[in-house]
Amino acid sequence: MSFYGVYMKFCLLGPPEVRDDACRLWFRGHRQRAVFASLALNANRVVETDRLVDIVWGDRPPLTAQAQIQKTLSALRQMLARTSTGGERISTVSSGYLLHADPGEIDVEVFRGEVRQASSAMVAGDLPGAVTCFRGALARWFGRALDGVPGLAAEATHLEEQRLIAWEECMHAELALDGHARVAAEIEPLIGSHPLRERLCALLMIALYGCGRRVEALRAYHGLRGRLHEELGIEPSSELRDIEHAILIETPAAQMLSAP
C-alpha cells in the first residue's frame, strides 16, 4: 500500500513503468515510454501534442509525428485497459491528452508527500519519525528518475535534486540521533558522484568527527576545498569553514548540526 492507501500504479522514479496488483506492464519501445512518462508526470493536466512530439523526437520530428503520437496513445489506452482497475485513463482534450490518476497512484507524488510528512516531523521534534518517513520516501526510488526518456532530462534532473535534498535531510536527522557511523558509511560513496556539493561534505565531516575519525573529517574538508579551488576558483562557504574550525577546537559534534 502507498502513503495514500492506494496501490502505486504509475512509476517514474526509475525507468518508467506501470504496475498494479495483477501485473507489471512493459512498454514497446522508446515512444510509448516517453509519451507515458510525459502524461504521468503531468497527471490530470493537459499535455499538448506538440510537447509530446518534442519530447519524443526533439527538434527533428518526422512528418508523420502527430499521427505516430495518436497511434502511440491508442496503444497506451489498450495497455492501461488491461490492468486490474481498467477504465478509460487517457482523454483527448483540445490540442492534447490528459492522464487521469489519483495522487497516490503516481510514485513521484507519493515520494513528495512522504518528504513533506518527514519535514513536518522534524519541525515537531520527532526525529525518529522523520527518519522513518524519509527512508520510506527514498525507498520509492528504483533507479534514476525517468531513465530512458532523454526528452525529459530537465525534469529528471529536478527530481534527482529533490531526492538528494531528501537524503541530506534524512542524514541530518540521523546525526541528531547519534547515528554518526551509519551516516559516514552512507555518505562516503556519494562524494564521488557529487564532489562539489558542500552540504554532503558538511554532513560527512560531522559524521566522521562524531565517530572519532577527526583526521578523516579534516581531510574531507581539505579535499573539497582543493576541488572547489581547482574547478571553480572559489573557497568553501563560511558554514563549511565554521565546521572545520569547530572540529579543530574539538567542539561536540551535536553542536555542529545547525551549520549544514
Image (cartoon, rainbow, N blue to C red):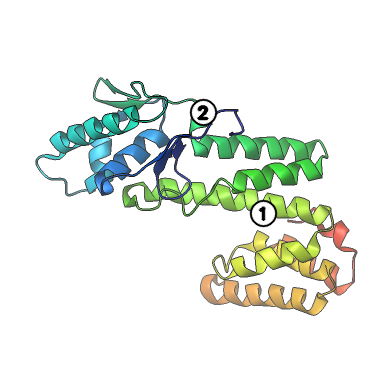
Q: For the N terminus, which image quadrant?
A: top right
Q: Residue furthest left?
A: 63
The answer to whether 74 is drawn above or below residue 25 in the figure is above
Say which mark, if any, is on residue 26: none
Q: Secondary structure at mark 1?
A: helix
Residue name at image x 72 percent, y 78 percent? 219
Q: The disc labelled 2 sits on which kind of residue?
A: Pro
Q: In the image, residue 68 lies at what x, y percent? A: 16, 38
x then y, percent, for residue 232: 53, 70
Q: Are marks 2 and 1 in contact (CB under 8 Å)?
A: no
Q: Quadrant of residue 215?
A: bottom right
At 53% from the left and 49% from the top, the residue drawn is 141
Q: Tag 2's secondary structure?
A: helix
Q: Which mark is residue 168?
A: 1
61 relative position to 251: left or right: left
| One can see residue 203 in this view | yes
Q: Is residue 205 above or below residue 53?
A: below
> Which one is closest to the eye, mark 2 or mark 1?
2
Residue carrying label 2: 103
Left or right: residue 139 versus residue 27 is right
